Image: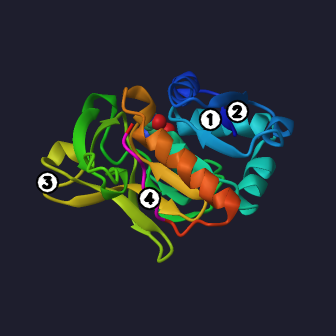
Amino acid sequence: MVVGVLALQGSFNEHIAALRRVGVKGIEVRKAEQLEKVSSLIIPGGESTTMAKLAHYHNLFPALREFVRLGKPVWGTCAGLIFLADKAVGQKEGGQELVGGLDCTVHRNYFGSQLQSFEACLSVPELASKEGGPETFRGVFIRAPAVLEAGPEVKVLAEYLTSSEKEGGQGGEKVIVAVRQGNLLGTAFHPELTADSRWHSYFLKMAGEVEEGTSNSTVTIASS
Ligand code: GLN
């Protein structure tokens, strides 16, 4: 399996390194033709407005939308999640172009500015292994988005309980930070910036099942 990583801007090198750790080759994708050589795609975190401008400049949006429409597995982390959402709010005036496909409304900077970046322990039942491995995952949130609304086909994989008004609200609110809809996976945080490879393993397993047509939107991973 060769996984493409959109390499216009942001943490694409970190995703390629994380894929290497789980024994999979990740290749940089910058042109529409390169998408034809990969069976699945990761859209990294970074800055979604800049990434959208670069994708527009390289005329990548039609090919990215076609990739999603064909049912190929795509994982968006942070800015990548924003890219995959059908709708984004909290944007600069005029908004930005999105790939879409995820029936979600995402707030671009739900948790505030760079200064409000944080790490948090999340409960992710789908990351628990059959052998009783933990379901907790330490999420790195950097100017992170959150999913405000998710459609009926969207499965919520993780929520974050806000603890103070700094974290986008009065505190004590649950916000959606990881979702799956068929061939699409979205995380508001950055698994590629941690040494824990379980999200990459999850995506690869999901991609394998989507490609084989055996996906039922649930993946059980073995502990690594
Ligand atoms: N909030 C940022 C954006 O709008 C995303 C931040 C990130 O990817 N770390 O693009």
Q: Nearer the viewer, residue 164 or 44?
A: 44
Is the CB of the residue bearing disc 2 within 8 angstroms of ligand 1? no
Mark 1 element type = helix
* Circle on res. 51: 1
Q: What residue type is disc 4 on?
A: Val
Task: Report crowding for label 3: few under 14, some 14 to 19, many 20 or more residues within 10 A (C-alpha).
Answer: few
Mark 1 or mark 4, whichever is nearer to me: 4
Residue 206: image x %, image y %?
55, 54
Q: Is residue 143 magenta?
A: no
Q: Quadrant of the N terminus?
A: top right
Task: For the residues labelled 3 and 4, say whether their Cβ atoms are less than 8 Å apart.
Answer: no
Mark 2 element type = helix
Q: What residue type is disc 2 on?
A: Leu
Tell me which label, 1 or 3, sits earlier in the chain.
Answer: 1
Mark 4 element type = strand
Q: Nearer the viewer, residue 119 or 92?
A: 119
To which residue does mark 2 refer? 54
In this image, 183 relative to 35: left or right?
A: left
Our reading of the magenta stretch's main secondary structure is loop
Highlighted range, magenta: 218-223
Q: Residue at x 47, y 77 (%)?
A: 152
Mark 2–mark 1 Cα distance, whole angstroms, equals 5 Å
Residue 104: image x %, image y %?
49, 64
Mark 3 element type = loop
Is the CB of the residue bearing disc 1 within 8 angstroms of ligand 1? yes
Say which quarter of the image contains residue 55.
top right
Tell me which label, 1 or 4, sits earlier in the chain.
Answer: 1
To which residue does mark 3 refer? 171
To which residue does mark 4 refer? 179
Q: Residue at x 67, y 37 (%)?
A: 3
Say which quarter of the image contains residue 215.
bottom right
- Asked if residue 12 can be seen in this view, the reply is yes
